[in-house]
Image (tube, rainbow, N blue to C red):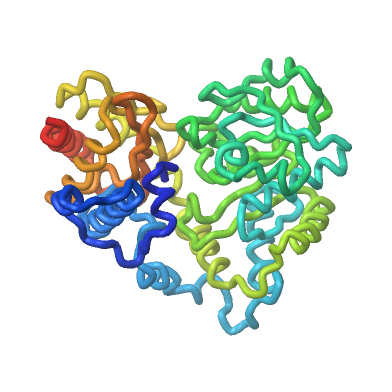
């Protein structure tokens, strides 16, 4: 989801009961900017939930009743007659073993958040290398979304290899002006458009780090989605790195949670730090069951979603061209995963209103995420393609794009 002002305001909104608000009501009341954004967000979520067609049905925006129903059939995933987990044993340990096997690593540890998992991993590596400096992209998640947690909490020293909206290059790693103990690569790099290197570029990046005696850590929150673009199985991709973090809710729609995988000695130390960081949670079985469900049911389907995302992206470009939009971009032009960006030369307010109206009036939610201002008269949104999108043909996407542009022109006058 896009990290917009609307969503920041929405952190205090009641997503469980989105308020029905019309555009006219917004205009006739004296609202603060935060109130206006909250109302728009509630209206967007309500329109999304009631839409008959959308490109993704995300648990993030689903009612609690639907989220609980997603655990129906959990008895096929794990023996529910076993005792519940206590501080990381039982079903938690079973998930850890499964993840380690999928990633081809000696061991794995479950963490409540990726923020915690990556801090722990990199401080453990810093203790081994004697160097707390972590080389990473300026758009990497810890630099953009974690309030300087590396510095403020874990005593790490992040340095930015590049700020270009692409993956770093091997030459940038080799030529970086100071030593670093670890290279962290976000695969895919979400804020640059969910972009990935090629397999050859990735192997060269890793080799460049090794030449500098640095360890390599993959921020693989969405690593599950990379196999199509990289053309390699998951374990072979993960094998390039000394340690890997993966998320369960980003790709699989689980309730939350993350895992850190790597050498057994590292994982044992990581579990000690997990406890110190407050991550030894008393019971976690609902989240664990949702993660197991994702691994069982969604992981095998991810390549299909990636392939169809390319159909959706091409059809969007064709629809915008058919509608006569002077300038529009789908980025990457051929998506690297099943998420990508759409850029249009309009303001956030106009685009948001057009997207919501299309959902409300036609039952088709083409753009369900918030729009993010990227410059004067230029905005971006993220498009998520999941199982629901498989019902859309290219012609359906083109028609929805043309209809959206017509509503956009009505709104913008």
Residue 299 shows up from this direction: no
Query: What residue do we see at 53% from left, 39% from top?
Result: 227
Q: Position of residue 305 (x, y in %)?
A: 39, 44
Which residue is at a point 51% across and 24% down the rendered structure image?
A: 165
Closest to the observer: 18 or 209?
Answer: 18
Q: Is residue 397 left or right of residue 270?
A: left
Q: Nearest the camera: 44 or 62?
A: 44
Residue 99: quadrant of the picture: bottom right
In this view of the protein, can residue 194 be seen by the observer? Answer: yes
Q: Position of residue 118 (x, y in %)?
A: 68, 47
Q: Is residue 125 above or below residue 205?
A: below
Q: Residue furthest front?
A: 30
- Expressed as whole percent of the image width and height from the top left, the position of residue 15 reads 36, 62
In which image quadrant can residue 318 be found?
A: top left
| Looking at the image, residue 190 lies above or below residue 282 | above
Quarter of the N terminus within the rendering: top left
* Residue name at image x 26 percent, y 38 percent: 349
Q: Is residue 142 above or below residue 373?
A: below
Q: Is residue 137 left or right of residue 307?
A: right
Above or below: residue 131 compared with residue 146: above
> What residue do we see at 18% from left, 39% from top?
400
> How many labels were placed on the picture?
0
The answer to whether residue 200 is left or right of residue 409 is right
Residue 328 spot, x, y in % from top left? 28, 24
18 on left or right of 254: left
**Quarter in which the C terminus is drawn:** top left
């Amino acid at each position: 989801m896009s990290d917009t002002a609307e969503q920041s305001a929405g952190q205090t909104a009641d997503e469980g009961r989105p308020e029905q608000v019309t555009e006219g009501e917004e205009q006739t009341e004296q609202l603060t900017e935060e109130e206006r954004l909250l109302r728009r967000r509630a209206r967007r979520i309500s329109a999304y939930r009631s839409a008959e067609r959308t490109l993704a049905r995300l648990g993030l925006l689903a009612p609690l009743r639907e989220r609980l129903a997603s655990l129906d059939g959990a008895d096929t995933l794990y023996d529910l007659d076993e005792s519940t987990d206590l501080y990381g044993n039982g079903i938690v340990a079973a998930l850890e073993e499964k993840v380690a096997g999928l990633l081809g690593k000696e061991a794995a540890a479950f963490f409540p958040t990726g923020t915690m998992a990556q801090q722990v991993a990199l401080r453990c590596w810093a203790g081994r290398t004697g160097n707390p400096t972590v080389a990473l992209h300026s758009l990497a998640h810890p630099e953009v979304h974690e309030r300087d947690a590396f510095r403020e909490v874990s005593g790490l020293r992040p340095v930015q290899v590049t700020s270009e909206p692409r993956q770093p290059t091997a030459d940038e790693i080799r030529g970086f002006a100071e030593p670093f103990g670890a290279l962290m690569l976000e695969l895919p790099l979400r804020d640059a458009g969910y972009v990935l290197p090629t397999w050859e570029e990735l192997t060269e990046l890793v080799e460049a780090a090794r030449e500098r005696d640095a360890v390599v850590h993959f921020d693989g929150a969405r690593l599950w989605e990379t196999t199509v673009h990289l053309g390699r199985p998951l374990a072979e991709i993960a094998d390039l790195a000394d340690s890997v973090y993966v998320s369960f809710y980003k790709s699989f729609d689980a309730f939350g949670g993350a895992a850190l995988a790597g050498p057994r000695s590292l994982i044992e130390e990581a579990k000690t730090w997990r406890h110190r960081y407050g991550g030894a949670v008393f019971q976690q079985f609902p989240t664990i069951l949702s993660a197991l469900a994702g691994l069982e049911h969604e992981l095998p389907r991810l390549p299909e979603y990636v392939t169809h995302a390319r159909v959706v992206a091409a059809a969007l470009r064709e629809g915008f061209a058919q509608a006569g939009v002077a300038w529009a971009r789908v980025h990457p032009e051929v998506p690297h995963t099943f998420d990508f960006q759409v850029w249009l030369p309009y303001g956030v307010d106009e685009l948001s209103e057009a997207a919501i109206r299309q959902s409300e009036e036609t039952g088709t939610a083409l753009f369900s995420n918030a729009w993010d201002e990227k410059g004067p008269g230029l905005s971006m949104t993220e498009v998520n393609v999941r199982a629901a999108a498989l019902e859309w043909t290219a012609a359906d996407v083109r028609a929805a794009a043309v209809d959206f542009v017509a509503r956009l022109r009505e709104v913008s006058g």
